Image (tube, grey):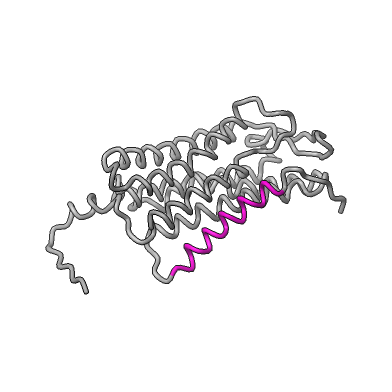
Amino acid sequence: MEFQTNPYLIWQVIPGIITLGIALYIQNRPVKKRESNVFSLLMFGGSLWAFANAIQLLTPDMGWQRFWNGVTYLGIMAVPTSWFLLSVKLTGVLRERVEKFEKYLWIPPALLYLLLLTSGWHHLFFTSFNAVTIGGYVALVNNYGPLFYLHTAYSYVIMILGIGFMIFSLATRFRKYGIQAYGLIIGVLAPLIGNAYFLFGSPPAGFPDPTPIIFTVTGIAFAWAIFGGHILEVVPLAHDTIVRKLTTGVLVLVQ
């Protein structure tokens, strides 16, 4: 197999390592909360997105690049739903209602990914692919169909909803929960802005999707929320919502 130099490789590997490290840390904690699974899935999705994007550009072979382009979208499609569920579980906003049909929220991305994999037959997700040479390396360029824009709209809606829940919780409990909410909001806004620029802005021809590169910011911000705000130790954003709904007394014993 022929290899090529990818100047963006290190900037995709770094966020992949950071987000993978956070995901593994969450999963290996001795005591895990319900939030931990979607939190780690969010980080695994970001890690897969970054690593697959890096591996894709290792060779100019278009078959190889198209295969890893498909793997990349597995990570891409896991991130929005994971983020939305994490924001719901942390803030407590609509938590009881959402958790009743939580598993069904994975149906849209699953169906869209299946349609992506079969796009060669119907051309509704990707209409075609082009190869461009820039800076001494060959990159795959996707030409998008209507299902891609449906996927993008769905992803942006649920991610923005999750951000809205976090901002609402931050605004109503600013002093008490600032460090945790700030870390999560910054972490999810950074790649969202980078992705919007890549899709709707004017990036140079052949420039790779900067979203996984910006996941470095996500990893650092989430690590700040975890280690600085101890977000996995307690879930204060959801505490008031849950406690207010208790119908029986609670006795707390402190040693």
> In the rendered image, which quarter is residue 211 located in?
top right
Query: Foreground residue, 114 or 73?
Result: 73
> Compared with residue 93, is residue 248 higher up or lower down, i.e. above or below?
below
Rendering coords of residue 42 (x, y %)? 50, 52
Question: Residue at horizontal 42%, vertical 50%?
Answer: 104
Q: Farthest residue to the right: give it.
A: 2
Question: Residue placed farthest to the bottom in the image?
Answer: 255
Q: Measuring from the top left, give residue 250's x and y in whole percent.
A: 15, 65
* Relative to 160, 14 lies left or right: right
Q: Position of residue 28 (x, y in %)?
A: 48, 68
Residue 125 falls in image quadrant: top right
* Quadrant into which the C terminus falls: bottom left
The quarter of the rendered structure image containing the N terminus is bottom right
* Residue at image coords 84%, 38%: 136
- Of residues 181 and 246, the one drawn nearer to the viewer in this rendering: 181
Looking at this view, is 59 or 115 the one in front?
Answer: 59
Position of residue 120 in the picture relative to residue 4 (left or right): left
Q: Is residue 62 placed above or below 234 in the rendered structure?
A: above
The structure residue drawn at horizontal position 34% and vertical position 52%, both measured from the top left corner, is 99
| Percent coordinates x, y for residue 78 in the rendering | 53, 49
Q: Quadrant of residue 130?
A: top right
> In the figure, 229 relative to 7: above or below?
below
Number of marks in the image?
0
Q: Is residue 189 left or right of residue 91?
A: right
Magenta-drawn segment: 10-29
Q: Is residue 104 magenta?
A: no
Q: Is residue 17 magenta?
A: yes
**Magenta highlight: main SS:** helix
